């Protein structure tokens, strides 16, 4: 059984220690409850996808206690500074370019050159983030296909047996997820409507913003927005052997692999390594990347979904 803990100094310290140790912890924000993990640790982030039983990898929102900690990892355009000054801490997340030395897991970005950042307003969330001392990746704390939880009891019913610590902060006051806005585009684009409205954003920017059509970005079609991302080399799937000019990415007992996603056949470890290893093998010294078969079960479904996108004909 999970521990559903009332918010105290001690329970927050306990959750912070779990996060630092690479484990999952659920915590309240003013929007919805988040399923948190150390955003700089690939394996910890992979545990999020495993617990949510997600059939694909979507980039996740990374939570920070204050704007200074975000600036260390992202390039902040003037418009972002302007919106952050107005709405942070609060129910809005910004898609930002990763700095070259950004320590965040590539899995958090699903391999994209950007990540989404949020500074939540709820005081207990800020205390937790400060106590943890690491950026915390957190999607809504529900299993894939279920609605976002706004009470600790929802989380315990749905994910309870998978999460050791659930901090109970009572019902969330906003109750819908944060607005996600991408300011890396020419026209600022709302990718997901949420707690901060389009009108409020336009009033601050003194400019109209675009709203992405739902079939590109909605949670119902996760990963669609990633279709433009792929390694530069062609990718060949279900390869039981490789030719000499290909870089061979193994899984399990693959013979002749350049690197192995998980020699022991562990899908969580493989998910944690996926983007970093694709990146490593994406080198012009090879003619292509051959990938060993990955079982279509558990996290393997998300890994294969991502690999099929990487192998799809390029636009
Ligand atoms: O209110 C919230 O935002 C909650 C609480 C826990 O903070 N979190 C949440 O996170 O809903 P998540 O991971 O479920 O939602 C992430 C959304 C997805 O729609 C995803 O596609 C988008 O943000 N997103 C994240 N990183 C992105 C990126 N680099 N580029 C484009 N979209 C991104
Ligand atoms: Mg969600």
Image (cartoon, rainbow, N blue to C red):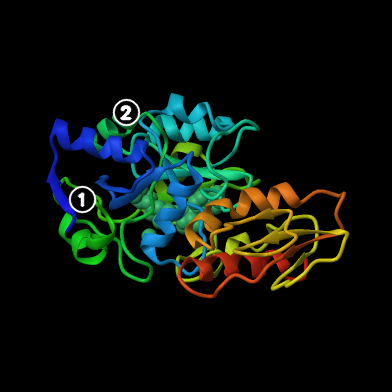
Please, is residue 199 above or below residue 299 in the view? above
Q: Position of residue 114 (x, y in %)?
A: 59, 44
Q: Work out whether residue 191 can be spotted.
A: no
Circle 2 — which element?
helix
Distance from disc 2 to disc 1, alpha carbons, whole Å, reads 20 Å
Q: Residue furthest top?
A: 68
Label total for image: 2
| Residue 254 shows up from this direction | yes
Quarter holding ligand 2: bottom left
Q: Position of residue 122 (x, y in %)?
A: 24, 38
Q: Nearer the viewer, residue 146 or 31?
A: 146
Task: Pick the residue in front: 225 or 194.
Answer: 225
- The residue singled out by tag 1 in the image is 172
Q: Is mark 1 on a helix, strand or loop?
A: loop
The quarter of the picture where the C terminus appears is bottom right
Q: Residue at x 30, y 40 (%)?
A: 18
Left or right: residue 88 versus residue 210 is left
Q: Closer to the observer: label 2 or label 1? A: 2
The percent coordinates of residue 274 (x first, y second) are: 60, 55
- Give the quarter of the figure containing the N terminus: bottom left
Whether the residue under disc 2 has CB within 8 Å of ligand 1: no
Residue at point 57% right, 53% down?
110
The foreground one among 14 and 267 is: 267
Q: Residue 97 carries which label?
A: none
Which residue is pictured at 41% across the width and 50% down the height? Answer: 179
Q: Looking at the image, which residue is at 55% across and 64% down?
A: 223
Q: From the image, tell me which residue sits under label 2.
A: 130
How busy is the neighbourhood of tag 2: few (under 14 within 10 Å), some, or many (20 plus)?
A: some
């Amino acid at each position: 059984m999970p521990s559903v803990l009332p918010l105290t100094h001690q329970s927050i310290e306990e959750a912070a220690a779990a996060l630092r140790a690479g484990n999952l912890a659920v915590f309240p924000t003013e929007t919805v409850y988040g399923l948190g993990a150390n955003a700089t640790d690939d394996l910890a982030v992979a545990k999020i996808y495993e617990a949510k039983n997600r059939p694909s990898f979507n980039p996740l929102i990374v939570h920070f206690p204050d704007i200074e900690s975000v600036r260390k990892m992202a390039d902040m355009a003037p418009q972002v500074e302007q919106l952050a000054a107005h709405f942070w801490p609060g129910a809005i997340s910004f898609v930002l370019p990763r700095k070259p030395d950004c320590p965040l897991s590539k899995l958090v970005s699903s391999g994209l050159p950007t990540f989404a950042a949020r500074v939540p307003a709820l005081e207990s969330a800020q205390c937790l983030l400060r106590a943890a001392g690491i950026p915390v990746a957190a999607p809504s704390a529900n299993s894939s296909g279920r609605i976002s939880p706004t009470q600790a009891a929802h989380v315990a019913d749905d994910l309870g047996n998978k999460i050791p610590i659930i901090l109970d902060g009572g019902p969330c006051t906003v109750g819908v997820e944060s607005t996600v806005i991408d300011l890396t585009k020419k026209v600022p684009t709302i990718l997901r409507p949420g707690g901060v409205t389009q009108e409020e954003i336009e009033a601050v920017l003194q400019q109209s913003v675009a709203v992405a059509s739902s079939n590109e970005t909605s949670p119902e079609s996760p990963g669609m927005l990633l279709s433009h991302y792929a390694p530069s080399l062609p990718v060949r799937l279900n390869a039981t052997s490789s030719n000499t000019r290909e870089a061979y990415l193994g899984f399990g007992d693959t013979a002749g692999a350049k690197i192995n996603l998980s020699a022991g056949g562990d899908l969580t470890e493989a998910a944690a390594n996926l983007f970093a290893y694709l990146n490593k093998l994406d080198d012009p010294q090879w003619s292509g990347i051959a990938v060993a078969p990955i079982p279509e079960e558990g996290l393997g479904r998300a890994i294969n979904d991502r690999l099929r996108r990487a192998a799809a004909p390029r636009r």
